[in-house]
Amino acid sequence: MDGSAGEHRPPWDALAPLVRAARAGDALAMDEVLAAVTPYVTRLCRPIALSDAEDAVQEALTAIFVGLRGLRDPRAFYAWARTLTVREAVRVARRTAAERSVDPGEAARLRGLADAGDGELPAQVRDVLARMPARHRAVLVLRELEGLDEASAAEVLGVPPGTVKSRLHRARSAFRKAWRQ
C-alpha cells in the first residue's frame, strides 16, 4: 500500500477503474472487484441472514457478477452493491428461516461463527439481532450500521419510506426490550 499523504481517495473511487474493466469483460478485473467487495458484502449479510450468511454472501456476489455489466455509473458501485446485498440477505433469510426467531442454541452457534470472522459486532448485539425477524435486522443494519436515512433505506429495501419508519420503530423497540432481558 502506498503511504503517501496526498492519496485519500475512498476505496470505491479507487475501485471504479476495475469496475469499468469488469463491465467490459475483463475477467481479472471482475475477480478483483469481487475480492474487494466480499468483506463489505459479508459485513452486511451477517447480521441480516445470520446462520445463512454464507449463502447470502454467495447469492449477493453472484447477483453482483451477473448484474455488473448493466451498471451505468461505476462510481455508483458501492450503493448498487449494497442494495443487491441487502435484498439478497433478506431473501435468503426469509427463504431459509421463514422469519422465525432463532432459539438460544442457534444464537450461541451464531456467536461462534461471527467470532471466527472480523468480530465487528459485540456478541450481545449479535444475540439480540438473532432473535429478530430478517426485515427488522435489515432496517437496523441500513440505519444504524450503514447510516442511511429512511428514504435511502426504503429504496434499498424496495419498500415505501413509511414502511421503513414503522419497521424501524418496531425493530428499535424490540431491540431495546430484548437488550434488557
Image (spheres, rainbow, N blue to C red):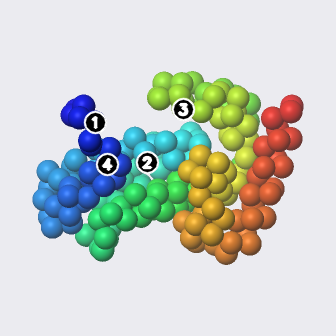
The tag on residue 120 is: 3
Mark 1–mark 3 Cα distance, whole angstroms, equals 27 Å
Task: Name which of mark 4 and mark 3 comes first in the sequence.
Answer: 4
The residue indicated by pointer 2 is: 41
Query: Going 27% across and 53% down the picture, which residue do you hit?
Result: 15
Q: Is residue 138 visible in this depiction of the protein?
A: no
Q: Are marks 4 and 3 in contact (CB under 8 Å)?
A: no
Horizontally, is 175 left or right of 86 in the view?
right
Horizontally, is 130 left or right of 89 in the view?
right
Quadrant for the N terminus, please: top left
Does dot 2 land on a helix, a strand or a loop? helix
Q: Position of residue 5 (x, y in %)?
A: 28, 36
Camera-side residue: 136 or 100? 136
Q: Position of residue 31 (x, y in %)?
A: 21, 49
- Residue 156 is drawn in which quadrant? bottom right
Quadrant for the C terminus, please: top right
The residue indicated by pointer 1 is: 5
Does dot 3 land on a helix, a strand or a loop? loop
The residue indicated by pointer 4 is: 9
Between marks 1 and 4 in the image, the one whose residue lies nearer the viewer: 1
